[in-house]
Structures are given as C-alpha cells and as structure tokens.
Image (cartoon, rainbow, N blue to C red):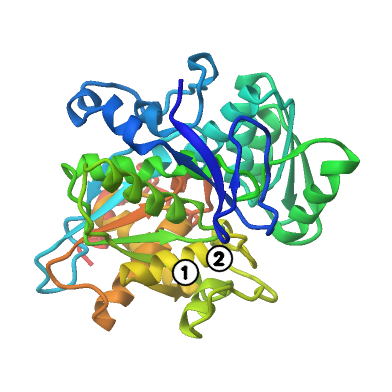
Amino acid sequence: MNFVSHLECSLTGERYPAGQPLGVSAAGKPLLVRYDMRRLGDAVSKAELAGRSGGLWRYWEFLPVAETGNRLDLGEVVTPLIRLERRLAAGDSGELWVKDEGRLPTGSFKARGLCVAVAMAKELGITHLAMPTNGNAGAALAAYASRAGLKATVFCPADTPEVNLREIAFQGADVYRVDGLINDCGRIVGAGTEAVGWFDLSTLREPYRIEGKKTMGFELAEQFDWELPDAIFYPTGGGTGLIGMWKAFAELEAIGWIGSKRPKMFAVQSEGCAPIVRAYLEGKEFAEPWENACTIASGIRVPVALGDFLILRAVRDSGGAALAVSDADINECQAEVATSEGLLLCPEGAATYAAYRQARLKGLIGSGDRVVLFNCATGLKYPMPEMTATFDAEAPNAYARFRAQNKK
C-alpha cells in the first residue's frame, strides 16, 4: 500500500503514471513524486508516528514503496541533533544545532536517498543500477544494492579518496576510476544506459532519491515538536537533500501538521566550485557549469546540478541565500568544532559552519535564531592532521619536562 498518485515534471508540471521505471521528464528535468495528500493525512497522525521506532521507514506513508518486503533495512536511525554550546557569535541568544547524518549506514546522508531509490528499483523489477559518485553515494548504493540482491556499477573521479573506493568495492559494487570530474562520470553512466542496459541512478535522474532525502525534513520537524527552525545550512552539490526537505515541508503543511512558516534555506558551496552561488548572485534561474572545479570538500564538487532551478527556488522563496566558503575556512572550522565541541565534522559539514559564521557577519540571520547545520557524513572517512608527539617515560626528568611543556 502507498499513497502515490502520479509523478510530475518539476519544471513543466506534466504528469506521468506511477508504478513504472522512469528517469527524467520529456523536458529533461527531474520528476517529483506526488501523493494523494487527503488520503495520506487521514491514514496517519502525529500521535501514531510518535509511537513508532526505527529510522526513515517510520514515515512510510510519505514514501513510494508499496510492498513492506521491499523496504530495505540496514539499521537506519533518526539522526541526532547536537547543540553546539560554544559556537554562537558573541552576544547571540539563539540556538545552533548540528544534524549529524554521519550516524547512518555507510556513514553519510546518502544512505537515505539510496535506501529508497534501491528499494523502488527492486519493486519495479530493475536488476542493474549504475551511478557516478564522489564517494559516499557510491558506498550507499553498493550497500543497499547488495542488501536487495541487485547488481551495482559505480564510476568515480580518479582523485576520489581511497577509503571511499575500497568501501564501494568491498560492499559488492563494480567500481571504476575515471580521469575527470563527477559530470564526466555521469556521461559514462548515461551512455551506458542503452549500451549496457543498466538503470541510471544519477542524482535527480530518477524520482526516488529525493523521497529518501526528504525524511531529513520530517525528522527535523518532529525533533523540534513540529516547529521548524529559523534557518538551515545545507552543503549543496546536487542539492537533492535541500530540494527534498523543501518538498517535505510542503507535504507536512498540506496535511495540517505545520503552518506556512519556512526556514531560511542556505545552500553552501565551496569557492572552488560554486555554480549555484554564482547563479543566485546573478539572479538567474539556471546555473552555468563551473569550470575547473576544485575543493577539498569533494561531496560538493559538482560542476553542474540537474536540479539547479529547484535549489535556487527554495533558497529564494525561503528568504535564504547561496554562500561560498574557502577551503581554508573549511579546514579552520573543522578543527575548531572538533577541539571545542568534540564533534568531528566532514569537510562538507564544516563548510556549513563556515557559512553560518559568514551569514551572521552579513546579518542574514538574527542573533536569536534557531539554526541547523547539516553534517552530511562522518569525519572519520576524511584525512586528519598527522599526530607526531611521543613520550619516553624512561628519559631523564621526563615528567618534569612534561609539566613544563604543558604550562606553556
């Protein structure tokens, strides 16, 4: 059972039937899943939801998978909100929270989208999935495809971190390095759809990853007792999660669980790859591809996003902004939060904190605002500074020297 009524082109509104494998619309734009919101609202209540355990499948009425047996489970959880106690700007009276998506299977928020997308592939009878990835999405695809008994093929830029490549391969996918960026990998996947026969699971080239990612919005609303925060800072490459949360808020309002108030949505990118930021500043609806993309935050190194106009609409309609931060700021913020708060952010998550600081300086958010930063993956997957200190307890005056050094 599900409450899906149809699919819809995100640009033109053209309708498509549910229940069959589909990629993008005739206009070449993402398809969005639409639901019979009246029936859905009658079928579930906040009180019933509060009594459920588990992760994203708690919201099954809002998801497209009809057969209970197709709902893949690798131990998904409702990810925690962790309050940063010392990181508010001087004089601020608001709240600063991190939604830590690194607690999900495969260590990143990519688990949400791929869990639902692979479950739908299984339900629709698809047997071979392929995608381009900068790392974490490929790991999630590999894990859930193996769980579902489906074949997965993954293409990664040649400089993808080795830990990601090994993780993808170890969890059962065929993985290949490509001399280029993620959009180059995407072209290979697209060409192979007909030549090889796999199904293209690239970001926003199928309708169901958004549905998994939108559960971040449901969780936020529920964790804040159905009152949305004032601002959300989201690391934005393909932007599926930002688009998904915006969709989730609209669905919650449609069944009367929240009102019309929305958070300011901040799309965060790197100065080395900022097509959404450039389009936002230039007042454009669509973003031009970014040339020579380069950043340490590989998850947001996406030169062109198929859903660019959906990201920009959400940002503008919410009164938010698109902000770019430097790699130096990312490194600084990652270290700052680790040493002062005990929270190990990934580079993309650290970028959201850097953007928050920027937004406060520019007056884009208020001193009393409740703000949520998204940490999209565990920091344990990324390089950390080398540790070189040693201690020889047998050396003359070892403890005296230790005390002297630690008084400095």
Circle 2 SS class: helix
To which quarter of the image does residue 336 belong? bottom left
The three-letter amino acid code for the residue at tag 2 is Asp
Residue underneath mark 1: 312
128 left or right of 366?
right
Q: Could you tell me if residue 53 is visible in this image?
A: yes
Q: Are marks 1 and 2 in contact (CB under 8 Å)?
A: yes
**Residue 286 location, x and y as percent?**
58, 73
Spatial CA span between label 1 and label 2: 6 Å
Label disc, if present, on residue 308 of the rendered structure: 2
From this viewpoint, which residue is outermost toward the right?
195
At a point 9% along the width and 66% down the height, the residue shown is: 93
**Residue 256 location, x and y as percent?**
22, 43
* 155 shown above or below 38: below
Q: Could you tell me if residue 343 is visible in this image?
A: no
Q: Residues within 10 Å of mark 1 (few under 14, many from 20)?
A: many
* 22 shown above or below 341: above
At a point 33% along the width and 76% down the height, the residue shown is: 358
